[in-house]
Amino acid sequence: MVSYVYLIQNGDLFNIGFTNNLERARIDLRPGELIAFLSTEKPEPLIKNLRKLYVDNRIPGSDYYRLSNSQVKECRTLLEGDGSNNYFQPFLKGPRLFIFFMFSWFFVTYIIIEFAIDPILSRFS
């Protein structure tokens, strides 16, 4: 099920959270203004990392944060920008994973031949 990670501004405070119904969250957090959001299948790792990133700015006992302009831009970039979809994704996937696997396979094969098989064969020649 698709969930939404959002950043909502209410005065000088910002709410970072996630929901399955973005419109309902906007209504519940009125008069807040939706600054940025990202739809994702797995919101938990993303929201955990965002909250950890801004833990020093959190208002105790709430999901509200007092963020500077640069932090708001950074959070907005993470949710909407070019890196949003790949920010918390593994580095090795697709073609990179295939190339890494092939390189590793050849390297391990070379090491086995060089240090295990060649010394044994050199004893018989």
Image: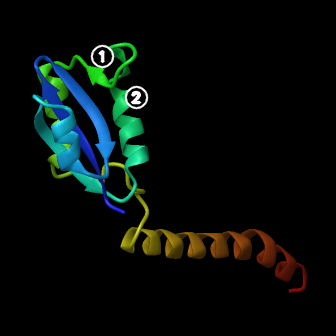
- The amino acid pointed to by label 1 is Asn
**Residue 62 relative to residue 10: left or right:** right
Q: Position of residue 110 (x, y in %)?
A: 64, 74
The number of numbered discs placed on residues in the rendered structure image is 2
Q: Residue 81, image x and y in percent?
A: 15, 48
Which residue appears at 33% of the width and 18% of the height?
A: 58
Q: Does 81 sit above or below residue 104? A: above
In-front residue for pair 109/28: 28
Q: Secondary structure at mark 2?
A: helix
Q: Is residue 85 visible?
A: no
Disc 2 residue type (three-letter)? Lys
Looking at the rendering, which quadrant does residue 33 occupy?
top left
Q: Which mark is residue 110?
A: none
Q: Secondary structure at mark 1?
A: helix
Q: Which residue is mark 2?
A: 52
The residue drawn where x is 30% and y is 16% is: 57
Q: Which mark is residue 57?
A: 1
Cα distance between the residues tagged 1 and 2: 10 Å
Give the image quarter of residue 115: bottom right
| Residue count near mark 2 (Cα–Cα under 10 Å), binned few <14, some 14–19, many ≥20 | few
Report the residue that reaches farthest toward the bottom.
125
Q: Judge left or right: residue 94 versus residue 31.
A: right
**Circles 1 and 2 in contact, beta carbons < 8 Å:** no
Residue 53's spot in the image, x, y percent? Answer: 35, 28
At a point 45% along the width and 75% down the height, the residue shown is 98
Q: Tell me where residue 69 appears, x and y as whole percent.
A: 11, 22
Q: Residue furthest top?
A: 60
Q: Nearer the viewer, residue 113 or 39?
A: 39
Image quadrant holding the N terminus, namely bottom left
Relative to 93, is 58 on the left or the right? Answer: left
Residue 6 can be seen in this image = yes
